[in-house]
Image (cartoon, rainbow, N blue to C red):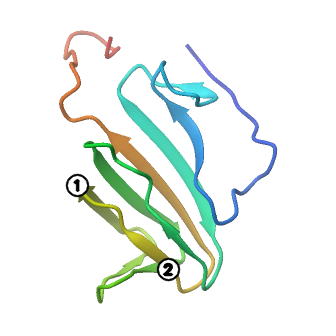
Amino acid sequence: MIQFHEPDQTYSLNQWRLLAGSERSEAPMKFRSEVLFYDVRLEKENSLQSPNLNGKTGLLYVFSGNIKIENSDEIVKKGDSVVIKDEQLDLISREDSDLVFFVLDENAPFSRNGLFAK
């Protein structure tokens, strides 16, 4: 199944936007796996908390810019990713930054037969 979605706005400024997710999600595009996919443009000096994981695993990827993880000395730059478990991170943008975030269910059933995961 090929899907197309043209969001109302090019960027979701300073708040997570759910673009794709499992068939049970409210996402406009559907995955056939237990994954949620978010994006955001975090403008300079704005902060945002990572999405709630609800016991799942998070993967943050920085497409452009760089962010600081609050209460740490960690700076995450363009091309870097962070895997998160059992916590939410407070992110502070040091410059305009484009981020994506995946929420993954590592315990979901999967198949290694064929091209599709269901």
Quarter holding residue 83: bottom left
Residue 56 x/y as whole percent: 27, 42
Element class at badge 1: loop
Between 78 and 9, the residue placed more toward the observer is: 9
Residue 29, relative to residue 72: is it above or below? above
- Left/right placement of residue 76 relative to residue 49 reads left
Between 27 and 1, the residue placed more toward the observer is: 27
Residue 76 x/y as whole percent: 38, 77
Residue kind at label 1, given as amino acid type: Asp
Residue kind at label 2, given as amino acid type: Ile
Residue 80, relative to residue 118: is it above or below? below
Residue 105 x/y as whole percent: 27, 35
Residue 22 is marked as none
Q: Dot 1: few (<14), some (14–19), or many (≥20) neighbours within 10 Å?
A: few
Q: Dot 2: few (<14), some (14–19), or many (≥20) neighbours within 10 Å?
A: many
Element class at badge 2: strand
Q: Along the polypeptide, which appears first: circle 2 or circle 1?
A: 1
Foreground mark, 2 or 1, reads 1
Residue 57 x/y as whole percent: 27, 47
Q: Which residue is mark 1?
A: 86
- Left/right placement of residue 8 relative to residue 87 reads right
Measured in 3D between alpha carbons, the distance from the residue under mark 2 to the one under mark 1, in whole angstroms, is: 20 Å
Residue 92 is marked as 2
